[in-house]
Image (spheres, helix red, strand yellow):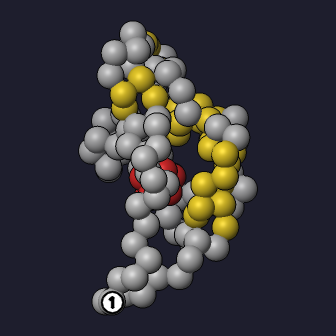
C-alpha cells in the first residue's frame, strides 16, 4: 500500500537530483536513483510493506535492513527470494511482490 512518495528533494547539505530512471513493481513504474537498493526505492515510493506471512497475518517489508531477517523478499526479473535491502536495483528491473514465504536451504520456514 502506498501513502505517497518520501524522497528528499531539497536537502541543503547534499542536494539530490530527481530520479534518473525507473523499475517496474507489480506493473507500476517506481522512480530509481543510481545506486539505490530495491528497498530504498520502494520506501521512497511510499511502500512500507510488500508481502505478507504465509497465513496472511502480518505485512512484511524492511525490518533489519542488512539482509539477515528475510522480511523484504521480492521476485526480481523472475528470480524469487531476492532480499530487497541488499539488491542494488538496475533500471528496467521487473519486481514482483507478494505473499510467498521464503524457502531457505531447501526447507520451508
Instruction: Report the residue at 37% width, 32% height from top.
Output: 60
Instruction: Report the residue at 32% width, 22% height from top.
Output: 58
* Residue nearest the observer in this picture, 92 or 47: 47
Residue 17, image x and y in percent?
A: 53, 82
Residue 29, image x and y in percent?
A: 66, 52
Outermost residue toward the front? Answer: 3
Task: Count the labels in the image.
Answer: 1
In the picture, which quadrant includes the C terminus? top left
Q: Which residue is mark 1?
A: 12
* Residue nearest the observer in this picture, 85 or 21: 21
Outermost residue toward the top? Answer: 55
Outermost residue toward the left? Answer: 64
Give residue 56's quadrant in the image: top left
Instruction: Report the residue at 64% width, 37% height from top.
Output: 26
* Placement of 80 over or under 84, stated as above or below: above
Residue 78, image x and y in percent?
A: 69, 35
* Placement of 97 over or under 62, stated as above or below: above
**Residue 6 seen:** yes
Crowding around mark 1 (Cα neighbors within 10 Å: few <14, some 14 to 19, many 20+) is few
Residue 89, image x and y in percent?
A: 58, 57
Amino acid at each position: 500500500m502506498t501513502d505517497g512518495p518520501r524522497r528528499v528533494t531539497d536537502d541543503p547539505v547534499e542536494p539530490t537530483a530527481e530520479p534518473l530512471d525507473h523499475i517496474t513493481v507489480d506493473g507500476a513504474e517506481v522512480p530509481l536513483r543510481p545506486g539505490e537498493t530495491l528497498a530504498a526505492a520502494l520506501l521512497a515510493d511510499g511502500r512500507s510493506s510488500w508481502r505478507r506471512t504465509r497465513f496472511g497475518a502480518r505485512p512484511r517489508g524492511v525490518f533489519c535492513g542488512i539482509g539477515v531477517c528475510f522480511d523484504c523478499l521480492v521476485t526480481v526479473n523472475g528470480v524469487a527470494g531476492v532480499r530487497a535491502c541488499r539488491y542494488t536495483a538496475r533500471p528496467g528491473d521487473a519486481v514482483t511482490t507478494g505473499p510467498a514465504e521464503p524457502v531457505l536451504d531447501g526447507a520451508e520456514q
